[in-house]
Amino acid sequence: MTKPLAGIKVVDMTHVQAGPACTQMLGFFGADVIKIEMPGSGDVTRAWLRDIDGKDSLYFTMFNGNKRSLTLNTKTPEGREILEKLIKEADVLVENFAPGAMNRMGFSWERIHNELNPRLIMASVKGYAEGHANENYKVFENVAQCSGGAAATTGFWDGPPLVSGAALGDSNSGMHLCIGILAAMQQRHNTGKGQKVAVAMQDACLNLVRIKLRDQQRLELTGRLDEYPHGELGIPLGESTPRGGNAGGGGQPGWMLKCKGAHNGTDPDDYVYFTLQANAWHKICERIGKMEWIDDPEYNTFEARRDKQFKIFEYVESLLVDMDKHQATVWAAEFDIPCGPVNSMKELAYDPSLRKLKTIVEVDHPDRGGKYLTIGSPIKFSDADIEVTRSPLLGEHTDEILKELGYSDADINRIREAKAL
Ligand code: CAO
């Protein structure tokens, strides 16, 4: 089976998470991803929160599969020359250094586009967009969740802003960048020209809190947010979209309900998310044995239920005292009610369906002395088999890549002695 991006060459100058998540996805899709790393140290995450002394961390291994590693000091004359050759042969260059770092290295977009390779697509992640007042600031994950509106709208109304466990700043920006690269490749197919693709972490986050900006406008226009718990609980709305706890964000009210283990204190993750989908009202009533609510005008419309949602959720929760979250999910699904378990990381790691579908995969890593778990491609293809390969050791492919560029063994020794590799 061929791969979607077979034949595409990517120069990967990324580090930490946002950039590496993007290039790993390009690697999953079959691109030849050459990760350029500082000789001696490499991507800083190789050493972050190590679980095995002296070995590549799981942070690094889980974001750098399907890549080759080339050590190169791009600030030496030899390193600069090699990077130029790579750029001339590549389709895409991805980087997520601090603002201005590529220019300081001597590889500005203008130089790459006008002098080195007009077909190359140069893709960057930065904390803020070019032209933004904060464009020169460095940004990490949680800072982006704050700048992009996720933190202010996550958590409970009477608690502090919260950051999500999902990498909305980093991996999400990387996925946005990946989409941009694929679009630019299609445009290049038509025009023959490369272009610069840029994603700001703030913007990528904001793109995922679209619903909260919807709510900001509704709040300003009507002074009401009926699906939030505030009305029913008598909590005043302020001037901005509030934190809604576990309220359903989209439009269908929902809440987190305790199941058996959470009721009796034996399992902190034994919850289901239960949705009061408007057009499932009849079935919900049947499932919970409240046939009298089906046609009761006090209950049978979204508007009528607005001030009774917690009463309904409490009642449903009382029915789950003897069911675990998986039993409760089946119990609800039997009546087509959208409801699902709060899966713990442990459950996800060993989930047989996810293993079977290669969404969770085990990858062999001899240097770590065994296998590690990682997340495979969440995107499945009918005509391409996505195989996840282990992350490379630092500089594992340096000689191989330099030979592909036409360097001899003697050249490589000379460049190594010059401390460029
Ligand atoms: N050869 C020579 N120099 C190299 C090199 C190589 N192979 N690889 C990196 N470098 C140099 C860069 O040129 C840069 O040098 P200068 O600062 O002198 O120009 C330096 O190493 C890397 O700098 P950095 O500022 O990017 O790294 P940092 O650890 O200080 O900051 C981060 C990290 C992530 C805050 C910053 O890179 C950033 O804001 N990136 C954009 C936003 C982003 O992607 N953030 C998310 C990262 S994931 O949480």
Image: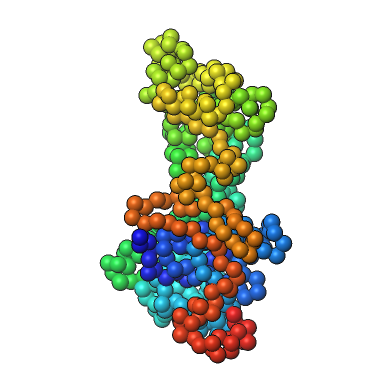
Residue 14 visible: yes
Rendered position, 166 above or below 132: above
In front of the other: 202 or 82: 82
Quadrant position of the N terminus in the picture: bottom left
Residue 127 visible: no
Quadrant position of the C terminus in the picture: bottom right
* Quarter where residue 276 is shown: top left
Rendered position, 148 above or below 127: above
Residue 408 percent location from the top left of the image: 50, 88
> Among all residues in the image, which is located at the extreme top?
292
- Please name the residue shown 61% across and 73% down the image: 38
- Please name the residue shown 59% across and 20% down the image: 322
Residue 41 percent location from the top left of the image: 65, 71
Residue 3 percent location from the top left of the image: 37, 61
Rendered position, 285 above or below 76: above
- Please name the residue shown 58% across and 73% down the image: 395
> Among all residues in the image, which is located at the extreme right?
53
